[in-house]
Image: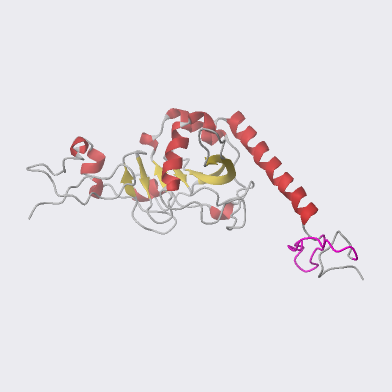
Amino acid sequence: MANRCIGIREDNGDPCQRNASGKSEFCYQHKGQEENYLIRYAKDDTYFCPIDGGELRYWPRGDARLCGECEGLLLNEKNIDPRIQCIVELPKAEDEDERIGCPTCKSDSDISVGENLMTNISVEWAEIVGGGQWTSGQVFRGVTNVGYCEVCGSFWFNEIGKYDDKGKRVDDRGIRIKGFWTKGVWRRNITTWLDNHDMFQEHNQWQMRQMRLQKIESLGKRKIQIYCNHIDSATGIQCGIRKSTKNTHDADYCYKHQPE
């Protein structure tokens, strides 16, 4: 029975399912990976996800380690382009409760005694969805926490859209579009962002933050214009029902919360 190729798919980091060719340990498509020691000895160089504990796979396209479950991505210090180091100059996130242990230090007993917690840094992101030759597409914006290890210099990229502008976790009703960030989309996007080194420059991050906050402010004003002005005394949440259009009703409230 032919041996299975030990190569790794470039698009998603999954193990190749083809048979190896001839005397090689790789198939015809992954023949070019024969000289990549990170792939050949991947089983001897293991890292684990700080979120769910699963083993991180080596991902050739991003030259990084990727979690197949939470979509988190680890960049070791030796794999980081110097231009990405400007991330450490960005504001630190306020939510220290979300700090995670460094996967690199945890896998190397010579570096770590115990667990080194990574420093959370707030990073703005923007993604253009759709669009074509005659259309500009729609821009989605948000913030994610990027973990930085001050001991070994590694970075951990969380899936985008999980955090607000203060670095605190938000649910799917926040800036993130529910169901949009399916597996694979994040991997394609993080590769684009890592290639776009200017994105992490402090002045560009400031501009992206201002544009996102302006969008939030405009959405807030629109919500006040459209929805009932009633505020729940217990939760402080504005009513989500549209204002009444009946001539006999107060136009600032819905049918349910009309003033007596």
Which residues are the magenta region?
229-248
Which residue occupies the foreground of this view, 238 or 24?
A: 238
Name the spot of residue 222 as percent of width and height, x first: 75, 49
234 vs 216, left or right, is: right
76 vs 176, left or right, is: left
Could you tell me which residue is drawn at 88 percent across and 65 percent down?
249
Is residue 68 magenta-colored?
no
Would you place residue 203 above or below residue 43 in this image?
above
Would you place residue 131 above or below residue 71 in this image?
above
Name the spot of residue 54 as percent of width and height, x first: 36, 57
Could you tell me which residue is drawn at 52 percent across and 52 percent down?
99
Name the spot of residue 48 as percent of width and height, x first: 36, 53
SS majority, magenta: loop
Locate the N terminus by quadrant: bottom left
Which residue occupies the foreground of this view, 97 or 73?
A: 73
Could you tell me which residue is drawn at 37 percent across and 48 percent down?
66
> Could one spot residue 112 in this view of the protein?
no
Which residue occupies the foreground of this view, 21 or 89?
A: 21
Could you tell me which residue is drawn at 26 percent across and 45 percent down?
8
Name the spot of residue 97 as percent of width and height, x first: 57, 55
Locate the C terminus by quadrant: bottom right
Would you place residue 223 above or below residue 259 in this image?
above
> Could one spot residue 34 in this view of the protein?
yes
